[in-house]
Image (cartoon, grey):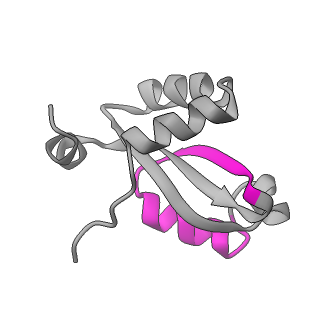
């Protein structure tokens, strides 16, 4: 399924943020842009309060919360190199208004 049509049917996303100091943060959300805004306001994870987010790097659509959590856990175990390769496969494109 192409990424565009997958995103249209997805409920959940695994997303990656680039944060201060070049650090990467991975999480899950129903609405990536809204969750990013929460992180920017300091309402997200403790990690993003300490390392403020700079941009959304990638987001991969997932069919449900359970699969999103499993994919997030697996992604967090990968090396930085592998995480960046994953991000290149799922670049973030803000939804059209």
Q: Quadrant of residue 42?
A: bottom right
**Could you tell me how many numbered marks the image carries?**
0
**Residue at image location 50% in from the left, 47% down from the top:** 15
Please determine whether, in this image, residue 74 is positioned above or below residue 38.
above
Nearer-the-camera pick, 59 or 28: 59
Nearer-the-camera pick, 56 or 43: 56
Quadrant of the rendering where the N terminus is positioned: top left
Q: Quadrant of residue 93?
A: bottom left
In magenta segment, residue 37? yes
**Residue at image location 73% in from the left, 54% down from the top:** 45
**Residue at image location 52% in from the left, 22% down from the top:** 70
Across and down, in percent, residue 38 comes to: 60, 68
Instruction: Answer with left or right where residue 93 lies relative to residue 86.
Output: left
Stretch of the chain drawn in magenta? 22-43
Instruction: Answer with left or right where residue 88 lies relative to residue 73.
Output: left
**Residue at image location 36% in from the left, 31% down from the top:** 64
Across and down, in percent, residue 61 comes to: 33, 40
Instruction: Answer with left or right where residue 29 lies relative to residue 53.
Output: left
Q: Quadrant of residue 53?
A: bottom right
Residue 47 visible in image: yes
Across and down, in percent, residue 77 comes to: 68, 23
Across and down, in percent, residue 46 comes to: 81, 55
In magenta segment, residue 31? yes
Please determine whether, in this image, residue 68 is positioned above or below residue 93.
above
Quadrant of the rendering where the C terminus is positioned: bottom left
Instruction: Answer with left or right where residue 29 lies relative to residue 60.
Output: right
- Furthest-right residue in view? 50
């Amino acid at each position: 399924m192409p990424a565009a049509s997958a995103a249209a049917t997805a409920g959940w996303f695994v997303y990656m943020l680039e944060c201060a100091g070049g650090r990467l943060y991975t999480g899950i959300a129903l609405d990536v842009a809204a969750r990013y805004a929460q992180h920017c306001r300091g309402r997200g994870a403790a990690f993003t309060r300490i390392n403020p987010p700079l941009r959304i790097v990638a987001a991969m659509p997932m069919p449900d919360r359970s699969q999103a959590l499993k994919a997030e856990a697996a992604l967090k175990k990968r090396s930085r190199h592998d995480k960046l390769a994953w991000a290149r496969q799922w670049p973030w494109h803000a939804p059209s208004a």
